[in-house]
Amino acid sequence: MCRSIKPLRNMDHPVTEQEIYEAALQYVRKVSGYRKPSKANDEVFQRAVNEVTEATRKMLEILIPIKSGD
């Protein structure tokens, strides 16, 4: 996994849309192997980032909080 993706759950502040987007972007970059895709792949790259962003937001909204040590 890409070590530059920081954990977003249980942060000391509410997670921002920007933080979720940046994590999704890092994930798609890692999986695709592209830092910046070509024009031919830009649309599918952005669609993937948007879908991962949305999935991440949904997951963070429904995760059940756990106490430390559980």
Image (cartoon, rainbow, N blue to C red):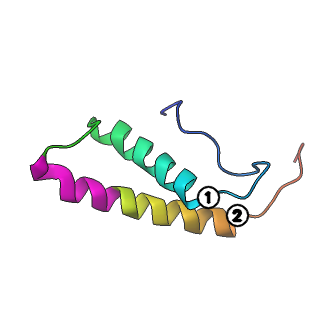
Q: Callout 2: helix, strand or loop? A: loop
In magenta, the rendered stretch is 39-48
Is 17 rendered above or below residue 62? above
Left or right, 15 with respect to 17, comes to right
**Mark 1 near mark 2, Cβ–Cβ under 8 Å?**
no
Relative height, residue 49 to residue 30 (above, below): below
Tag 1, which secondary structure? loop
Pointer 2: residues within 10 angstroms few (<14), some, or many (20+)? few
Residue located at (20% from left, 59% from top): 43
Neighbourhood count class around disc 1 (C-alpha, 10 Å): few under 14, some 14–19, many 20 upward: few
Q: Quadrant of residue 65?
A: bottom right
Q: Is residue 42 magenta?
A: yes
Q: Circle 2 is placed at which residue position? A: 63
Residue 42 appears at what percent x and percent y? 19, 52
Q: Which residue is mark 1?
A: 16
Asked whether, in this view, residue 42 is left or right of residue 1, the answer is: left
Give the residue type at disc 1: Thr
In the image, is residue 53 above or below residue 36?
below
Near-viewer residue (15 or 56): 15
Where residue 16 appears, x then y in whole percent?
A: 61, 58
Real-space CA distance between mark 1 and mark 2, rounded to the nearest whole angstrom? 16 Å
